[in-house]
């Protein structure tokens, strides 16, 4: 386990290319915006399906 942690640390320190602070901030904003858009899209689809199912069951009842 100790070797694994040492190798992981070495990999992160010497072989990973980290983005600049400005690029990390920009990408964070992109991910946050995409998450909001996706959440709104899922909410919209859920609302439409909910109304359709409600109408279907109201139609069956009558």
Image: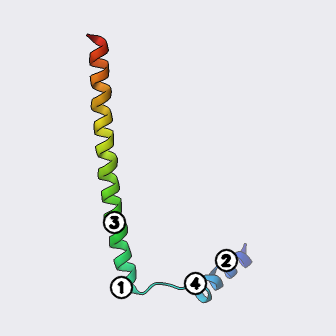
User: In the image, is residue 19 above or below residue 33?
Assistant: below
User: In the image, is residue 24 above or below residue 55?
Assistant: below
Identity of the residue furthest to the bottom in this view: 14
User: What whole-number distance in Å separates the C-alpha atoms at marks 4 and 1?
Assistant: 18 Å
Determine which residue is flagged by label 2: 5
Tell me the mark number nearer the camera, choosing from 2 and 4.
Answer: 4
Determine which residue is flagged by label 1: 22
Q: Is residue 7 left or right of residue 45?
A: right
Which of the marked residues, 2 or 1, is nearer the chain's N terminus? Answer: 2
Which of the marked residues, 4 or 1, is nearer the chain's N terminus? Answer: 4
Q: Measuring from the top left, give residue 59's x and y in whole percent.
A: 28, 16
User: What whole-number distance in Å separates the C-alpha atoms at marks 1 and 3?
Assistant: 15 Å
User: What whole-number distance in Å separates the C-alpha atoms at marks 2 and 1?
Assistant: 29 Å
Around disc 1, counting alpha carbons within 10 Å, would you say few (fewer than 14), some (14 to 19), or many (20 or more)?
few
* Circle on res. 16: 4
User: Residue 23 appears in which quarter of the rendering?
Assistant: bottom left
Circle 1 SS class = helix
Q: Measuring from the top left, give residue 15's x and y in whole percent.
A: 62, 86
Q: What residue is drawn where x is 74% and y is 78%?
A: 3
User: What whole-number distance in Å separates the C-alpha atoms at marks 2 and 4?
Assistant: 15 Å
Determine which residue is flagged by label 3: 32
Tell me the mark number nearer the camera, choosing from 2 and 1.
Answer: 1
User: What whole-number distance in Å separates the C-alpha atoms at marks 3 and 4?
Assistant: 24 Å
Q: Measuring from the top left, give residue 10's x and y in whole percent.
A: 65, 85
Q: What residue is drawn where x is 30% and y is 29%?
A: 52
Which of the marked residues, 1 or 3, is nearer the chain's N terminus? Answer: 1
Q: In the depicted view, which residue is nearer to us: 20 or 59?
A: 59
In contact (CB < 8 Å): disc 2 and disc 3: no
């Amino acid at each position: 386990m100790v070797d694994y942690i040492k190798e992981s640390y070495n990999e992160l320190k010497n072989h990973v290319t980290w983005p600049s602070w400005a690029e990390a901030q920009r990408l964070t904003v992109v991910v946050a915006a995409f998450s909001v858009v996706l959440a709104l899209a899922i909410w919209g689809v859920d609302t439409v399906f909910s109304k359709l199912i409600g109408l279907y069951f109201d139609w069956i009842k009558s």
